[in-house]
Amino acid sequence: MKKIRITAIRKASYPDLMAQYENPIEHACDVQEGQQWISVDGKCPDGMCPEAWKSMREFVEALSRGEGDFFDGWMKNPMSAMISCNDGFRPVSFYLEVME
């Protein structure tokens, strides 16, 4: 199986939505732009946010098996994907790529 590099590319924040809809929370996302993890054998890397993993797991597993070209040419690099976590208040975009 192939190793997959997961890179946090962008972290957005929507304070207006937080103020309107979210209850105050003590601890939010710790992910930083540029942070990287390596998935081995399609498994969740240590330190990866469990909720972010849920949003990307199927893509990481497919890439690790050598599958790619999702959605018929979606990505310039067919052995990659751009996936966002499911936090609507502070989403993080992750670039997934097969390591050669």
Image: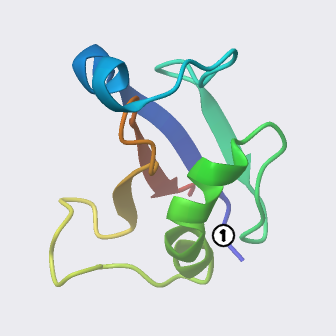
Q: Amino acid at mark 1?
A: Lys
Viewer-nearest residue: 17 or 59: 17
* Secondary element type, mark 1: loop
Q: Position of residue 15 (x, y in %)?
A: 30, 15
Q: Quadrant of the C terminus?
A: bottom right
- Check disc 1 and report the residue beneath it: 2
> Where is 84 relative to 12, above or below?
below
Q: Position of residue 32 (x, y in %)?
A: 54, 18
95 lies left or right of 51: left
Q: Position of residue 67 (x, y in %)?
A: 47, 84
Q: In percent of the image, x 41 and y 46: which residue is there?
A: 95
User: Within the image, what quadrant is residue 93 found in?
Assistant: top left
Q: Position of residue 27 (x, y in %)?
A: 68, 18
Q: In percent of the image, x 36 and y 60: which residue is there?
A: 81
Mark 1 Cα-neighbour bin, 10 Å: few <14, some 14–19, many ≥20: some
Q: Quadrant of the N terminus?
A: bottom right
